Image (spheres, rainbow, N blue to C red):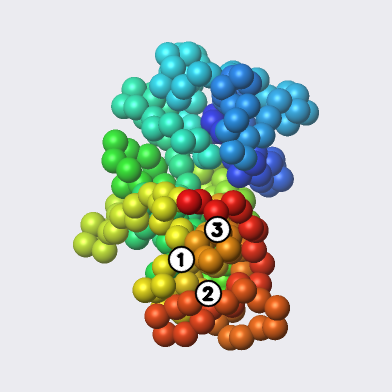
Amino acid sequence: MRAGFLTCVQLGLACMEAIYEVGGELTLAFTLHDHLAVNKSGRVWIDSFCEQHALPMIKLHHVNDGELVAAISREKLDWLFVIGWSQIAGAEVLATPRKGVLGMHPTLLPQGRGRASIPWAILKGLSQSGVTLFKLDDGVDTGAIVAQEIVPIAADETATTLYERIIFSHVSLMRSSWPKLVNGSVGLTPQDESIASVWPGRSPEDAVILPAMTLTEIDRLVRAVTHPYPGAYWDGPLGRIVVWAGSMHEIDGAIPIPARDGTYWATQVLRKDNPS
């Protein structure tokens, strides 16, 4: 099997490493030009990995660059993995690999298409989420499913702990799926549109703690947007604080935040200047 891999973040590099850990190898790697990714959150350089494995690498300005399409054709790639890449692949890119383009999404598709998958899973109080390996098509997270891995969500789950386990599941799913891709035993299961849902993107304004919220709502918000996300925030008498952790039960030394049905106690905070 001849496969290419397109990434510029740690999650993608971890999946590339997983391929080699199970005895696989890639034909070609793609990443962003250095100067375009200096300020990209989570950016990693895959140069050393490619050098270690004698893997040819091409740096791009955009996923839809003609250079990418030409390389896929020249190297006669069966599959192209696009993991950890925010740009949307166009029709020509999707059609060029012999078998198609594969991506991963951190939910159990068709539920949770869209953005902010980890925060939404906690905000919605779900008992489980997961990771889906799927074939990209011209929709958003709508392509046929190759494989999935379930990730249980604890009652006190935080974005920090869920993020770590979601990354682990990406790697685990790659390890288990690679041999099946090589021998051609994977199936492509169309997504069930009757149970599909789309989770919208979130903005900093969605992380504000309001007095009209219940204790449960505040607790979920704090846990959903803590590290590695920007955190929930509360504008109190002494100015704005970012709340990284807290409790629905009183804790000595914690900062009290009024809720509709009681008091939330912030235990880990970052004070900021008064926004007014």
Query: How many numbered tags mark residues here?
Result: 3
Find out whether the residues at labels 1 and 2 contact each other: C-beta distance under 8 Å.
yes
Q: x, y percentage for residue 266?
A: 60, 72
Going from N to C along the chain, the mark reached first, 2 or 3, is 3
Question: Which residue is denoted by mark 1 in the rendering?
Answer: 209
Q: Mark 1 and mark 2: span between their CA atoms?
A: 9 Å
Q: What mark, if any, has residue 152 been given in the picture?
A: none
**For discs 1 and 3, the disc positioned in front in the rendered view:** 3
Indicate the amino acid at tag 1: Ile
Image location of residue 51, percent across then percent down: 75, 24
Badge 1 density bin: few <14, some 14–19, many ≥20, Cα 10 Å: many
Element at label 1: loop
Q: CA distance from mark 1 to mark 3?
A: 11 Å
Q: Is residue 268 above or below residue 254?
A: above
Please, what is the three-letter code of the amino acid marked with disc 2?
Ile
**Residue in view at x 42 percent, y 14 percent:** 66
The tag on residue 240 is: 3
| Mark carried by residue 257 | 2
Q: Is residue 219 left or right of residue 8?
A: left
Mark 2, secondary structure of its residue: strand
Q: CA distance from mark 2 to mark 3?
A: 12 Å
Which of 192/221 is in front?
221
Report the side of 261 relative to 1 (left or right). left
48 relative position to 39: left or right: right
